[in-house]
Image: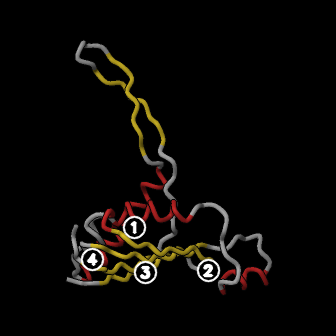
């Protein structure tokens, strides 16, 4: 079994958006319809998770690895496009890493959607992630670079 998995995904990072509330009519035991609320992910988030999971499964089938288990460390870098409003000089600074993307969307929301999409593919369960090192950077190519490595198998 692999002790470390490193993959670069050519996909635009998508943050985990707030869940939406839907209402559907359900038939009660008494024979009448009543409204029932349910939560669902917005379409952009669902599509991102499906596409990222598809790309990870494709990589998994080509390189023949099993999901990692035990205490795991995740290193992930999200590369996003610099704003179009930047001057050429600032654009160059941004792509060199001298100018950082400190505005929304939040880095933690990028991490959450990516963890959910890769759950059961790169790792058996995202609860096994004990160390996370994440970065958000500007680049001319949107992509995600992920490295997952096993820390140990010790259990409590």
Question: Label 4 to label 1, Cα distance in Å?
Answer: 12 Å
User: Which residue is at 66% across, 87% downward?
Assistant: 96
The disc placed on residue 44 is none
Q: Which comes before the other along the chain, label 1 or label 3?
A: 3
Q: Which comes before the other along the chain, label 3 or label 2?
A: 3
Residue 101 vs residue 13, the one in the foreground: 101
User: How many labels sit on residues?
Assistant: 4
User: Which residue is at 80% across, 78% downward?
Assistant: 87
Residue beneath disc 2: 140
Question: Label 2 to label 4, Cα distance in Å?
Answer: 27 Å
Q: Which comes before the other along the chain, label 4 or label 1?
A: 1
In this view, the residue farthest toward the front is 156
Quarter that holds the N terminus = bottom left
Q: Which comes before the other along the chain, label 2 or label 1?
A: 1
Q: Which comes before the other along the chain, label 3 or label 4?
A: 3
Question: Label 1 to label 3, Cα distance in Å?
Answer: 11 Å
Q: Which comes before the other along the chain, label 2 or label 4?
A: 4
How many neighbours does mark 3 have within 10 angstroms: few (below 14), some (14-19), or many (20 or more)?
some
Residue beneath disc 4: 60
Query: Dot 3 lies on which element?
Result: strand
The disc placed on residue 52 is 1
Mark 3 touches mark 4? (CB < 8 Å)? no
Query: Dot 2 lies on which element?
Result: loop
User: Residue 112 sits in which quadrant?
Assistant: bottom left
Question: Label 3 to label 4, Cα distance in Å?
Answer: 13 Å
Mark 1 touches mark 3? (CB < 8 Å)? no
How many neighbours does mark 2 have within 10 angstroms: few (below 14), some (14-19), or many (20 or more)?
few
């Amino acid at each position: 079994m692999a002790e470390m998995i490193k993959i670069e995904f050519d996909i635009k990072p998508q943050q985990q958006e707030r869940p939406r509330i839907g209402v559907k009519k359900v038939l009660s035991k008494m024979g009448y319809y009543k409204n029932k609320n349910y939560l669902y992910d917005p379409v952009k988030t669902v599509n991102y998770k499906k596409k990222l999971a598809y790309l990870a499964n494709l990589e998994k089938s080509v390189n023949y690895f099993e999901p990692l288990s035990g205490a795991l460390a995740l290193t992930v870098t999200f590369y996003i496009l610099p704003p179009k409003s930047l001057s050429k000089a600032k654009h160059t600074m941004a792509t060199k890493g001298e100018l950082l993307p400190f505005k929304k969307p939040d880095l933690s929301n990028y991490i959450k959607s990516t963890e959910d999409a890769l759950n059961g593919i790169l790792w058996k369960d995202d609860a096994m992630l004990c160390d996370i090192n994440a970065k958000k950077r500007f680049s001319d190519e949107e992509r995600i670079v992920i490295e997952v490595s096993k820390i140990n198998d010790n259990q409590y």
